[in-house]
Image (tube, rainbow, N blue to C red):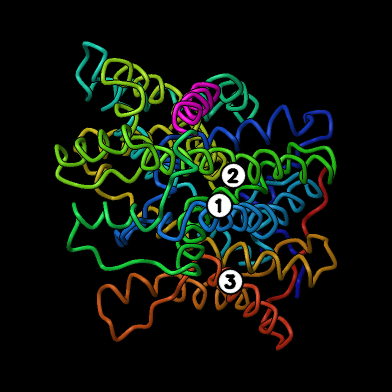
Amino acid sequence: MSNQPSQLPSYITSATPNPASNRAPWYKNTAPTYAGIFLWFVFWQGATTTQQGFLGGTLAQGAGVALLGLVVSALVCHALFYLIPGLFGMKTGLPLYIVGTSTFGANGGFIMPGFLMGVLQFGWLGVNIYFSAIALSAVLPVPAQVIMVIWGVLAAFVGLKGIQYVAKVASLLPLIPLVVLIVMFVKTQAGLANFSATQFVASHRSLTPASPGILDQWGVIAAVLTYVVGFFATAGAAGVDFGTNSRDKKDVNMGGLIGIAFAIVLTAGLSMLIVAGVYGSPDLSKAAMAAGVAKKGFILDSFNLIPVVMGDGAAKWIMFLLAVAAFPPACFSSFIAANSFKTTMPKVNPFITVGIGAAVSIILGVTGLAGKVIPVFVIIGASFGPICGAMLADFALSGGKWTGPRAGFNPAGWIAWLLGFFVGILPNLHAWCPCFPDMPAAPVVAFLVGTAVYYVCAKLGLQSAIVPLPAKK
């Protein structure tokens, strides 16, 4: 194949590696930024629930099984979804949308993971805008719609400034939800010894008689995996961008172990124990059941148990502070989107592309649509499993080196993604039509399928040719 630079899109030829002088230790960028994502109350409040509404949620087999599923999920996120992308970024100094061209091709990489990642992040930003503004408006004498506009504009601006500014925002505000979780745990830990999964399920059944059933031990672990990995998958692929700011392999590894694995176990683990502690305490359990009757449903998550544990007056301000602490995740989404558009469309002013995306996010929030599409975004996020899987296979096949972009649309990458994506959405297809099989822990299985299919395709010669990058003048 000819080595003419014209074969490569301008967004690839114009990319410049992040120099070593711009990099910093893991505790100054990667760890605090990732940790801020998992301290977002939208993440940890759902650790005890399931999308299907099973009785007892992930605590149906006791807190021990749920915590085991959480530890497994944390390690999967670090080792399978983040570490290889992070090493790719560290070694090349190039962002995801360039590194991904070795897996999906010079033209294919523009779409996947490039442009798709940016578009997806504005969906997450819309969700953040909506729920944060609703919580803030309960205290501030300002209409929620006005807060949504201000919130979206500020998050987009910080995201445009770069990861170092996102990390600064994320360095202090996450202490708020951490303190809330610790205080609630201290107030509820006495009930842990008396927590009974059987009684917990019975209490849930009394308020939700139409629930589909109870998860067994493997079902609990699979549900936690689906929830945590589905939430994290897009951020895992973005590990390439974090890696560009890491000095060495140790920075990449430590940033993931602390900012991802430890943060997942800490935040979601405390959330699980708080729920168990509430329903293991006679007084708090009665209050929780009464609150559930008032809400016409069983309260299964720690966020909605805040009034039960802290009292109605304090709860109002605590929820307000948690909304303020949700700002770093909003900045993170904007940062990922900004990187996507700045890389794939380098000739377009990023203030224009990110501004348009932020405007769409704000519209989704103001119209209320963002409050109804969280399951959709979780599914799309889980579809990044095969992207990370294909990148792992690419990394292994190249001996841990980045080969450079491949011509056109690399067949191996796209076949791996299509088959992995199909596996990832089987649970949704099953819910639509039982003729499709269900798939426990679908995001993880999608990752494994993406890895295996890419490897097989590569061995069958289904990789397009490498196109050398032109020498920089």
Q: Residue at x 19, y 47 (%)?
A: 297
Residue at 42% x, 58% y: name it.
Answer: 380
| Rendered position, 249 above or below 434 | above
Q: Say which amino acid is labelled 2.
A: Val
Q: In front of the other: label 1 or label 2?
A: 1
Q: Which residue is mark 1?
A: 67
Residue 276 location, quadrant: top left
Picture layout, residue 246 above or below residue 411: above
Q: CA distance from mark 3 to mark 1?
A: 42 Å
| Residue carrying label 3 | 409
- What numbered label is drawn on residue 265? 2
Residue 4 drawn at (x, y percent): 74, 63
3 or 1: mark nearer the eye:
1
Q: Are marks 1 and 2 in contact (CB under 8 Å)?
A: yes
Seen at 58% across and 19% down, the residue is 172
> Mark 2 packing: few (<14 Cα in 10 Å), some, or many (20+)?
many
Q: Could you say which is closer to the camera, residue 347 or residue 151? A: 151
Q: Where residue 279 sits: x, y (%)?
A: 36, 42
Q: Amino acid at mark 3?
A: Phe
